[in-house]
Image (cartoon, rainbow, N blue to C red):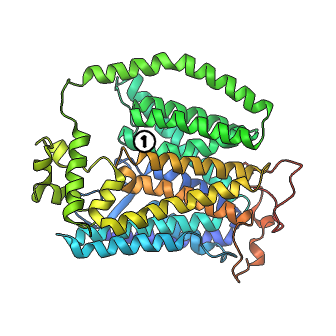
Amino acid sequence: MKWVALIVLLAAGIFFSWWLRRYPSAVPKALMLMGFLPLALSSDSLRLYMAAISWADWPGFVKGAEFSVLDAVALALYFSLPSARYALPFRISMALYFISVLLSAFQAQVPMATLFYPWQLARMFLVYAAVARACSLPHGAPAVLVGMAAGLVLQAGIAAWERFVLGFVQSGGTVHQNLLGVMSHFVVFPLFALLLAGRRDWLPAVGTLVGLAVEILTTSRATVGLALFAYAAVFALSALRRWTSRKALVLLFGVFAVVALSPLVVMSFDRRFAAEAPSDYDERAAFQAAASMMISDHPLGVGANQYVVVANVDGYNRVAGVAAVPGSLSANVHNAYLLVAAETGYLGLITFVLLLLRPMMVAFLCSWRHPGDQRADLLLGLSVALFTVYLHNFFEWIFVTFQAQYMFALDLGLVAGLTQQLGYRRRSGHLRRSYFREARLGAGPLPIRPKKHVVEAHNGRAGL
């Protein structure tokens, strides 16, 4: 049955690609769908993905060679768009990390399980490449943002139901609350940057408020603390670029929101801590001790997607004092960097950090070169969002899940497309086909336009 589902999915992707080539004005709708799907995919009840090879009982974070509806949409979109005028950014850092993960299979106790993770990375690269190509067009980025905001609204509604109707102390929507917190970072802070920049439609305001609600409902210490830091960082950097009356109004509203919501946040955390039995056992510290011993013994790594197996079979969890209960013995170390280092060695850690830092730095530097352009403000928000996720990685391992990496791929695609629009990168020899010029795209959803006094980018395109 799964092969029938895969054939149907691929056939639908081929038809969808033909349809997008026939009607290029529908590209923004496809991008909205791509922005929405990562959060919708998080629901197991929808089952918007299948596995050609399925190891459902494998304790690692990837349980097979999976293929999702989002992958099919990305494939269709990529081949429906004309070839890009610019070489795809960040491909070298992505390739280096991909190679380091592949090499770790030679160290793995179960090599096949390790190969599931490179396949996941290849799917993320496909989504990134499709979004980057589409977002180099004027109406691409707004469509992706609308879809991401819609997905966050969906998760916020489910989380609110869990909190106020079902009585959950920590609400995670269709996923774990910590994963929802990480995923929300990718959406909220770019929209908050647009709100500060003067965008006058519903998207930035609604997205920011919904994101704030999601972060509070998770009752996650890392999520709430890092969110406060990120809001402050975006505001401070935006204010340094240019002070406006809108930013003064947002500052006043922010102070009021902190005062009004603080009692609710404190009560939520009090309920959470009261429900937890007091104990001297520090599980995070035990996990980190096990991972550190594993890295010391295996500087080349134990193989991607192998941490839980090695930690138990080779006795690292026992020596580190990890509680001998199913929930603990089946968990990864709560630090993405330690997890990557343990599984792929120092080479994997270096290439992983390079993969993370390069787009963040490009987004920040490009945003600073174009004051007054809302695309640059969006890049500023993206750079802070990425930095916040990277900080969150010190407290969670879930960046390696496909849900988080889909969101990462979307943000990287936005960075790549916007920096290309702003002339940050040199042209390749490819030209866009004439039938797919900006006029053929139609009005598109909610275009982002630079302020009137800003000169259009040197490549002749209008602002988003």
**Where residue 146 sits in the image (x, y, percent)?**
62, 47
| Vertical placement of residue 149 versus 64, above or below | above
**Where residue 262 sits in the image (x, y, percent)?**
50, 19
Quarter of the view holding residue 282: top left
Q: Give the labeled residue for mark 1.
A: 180
- 84 displayed left or right of 180: right
As rendered, which of 269 and 147 lies closer to the eye?
Answer: 269
* Disc 1 packing (10 Å; few <14; some 14–19; many ≥20): many
Say which amino acid is labelled 1.
Leu
Quarter of the view holding residue 150: top right
Asked whether residue 104 appears in the rendered view, the answer is yes
**Where the C terminus falls, by quadrant?**
bottom right
| Vertical placement of residue 370 versus 128, above or below | above
Residue lying farthest to the bottom in this orientation: 429
As rendered, which of 366 and 75 lies closer to the eye?
Answer: 366
**Where the N terminus falls, by quadrant?**
bottom left
Please give the name of the residue rendered at 41% of the width and 22% of the height, measured from the top-left corner.
Answer: 164
- 266 displayed left or right of 150: left
Please give the name of the residue rendered at 33% of the width and 74% of the height, measured from the top-left corner.
Answer: 102
As rendered, which of 259 and 406 lies closer to the eye?
Answer: 259
**Where residue 85 sits in the image (x, y, percent)?**
70, 76
**Where residue 160 sits in the image (x, y, percent)?**
45, 28
Provide the secondary structure element on which disc 1 rests.
Answer: helix
Asked whether residue 63 appears in the rendered view, the answer is no
Please give the name of the residue rendered at 18% of the width and 70% of the height, measured from the top-left corner.
Answer: 110
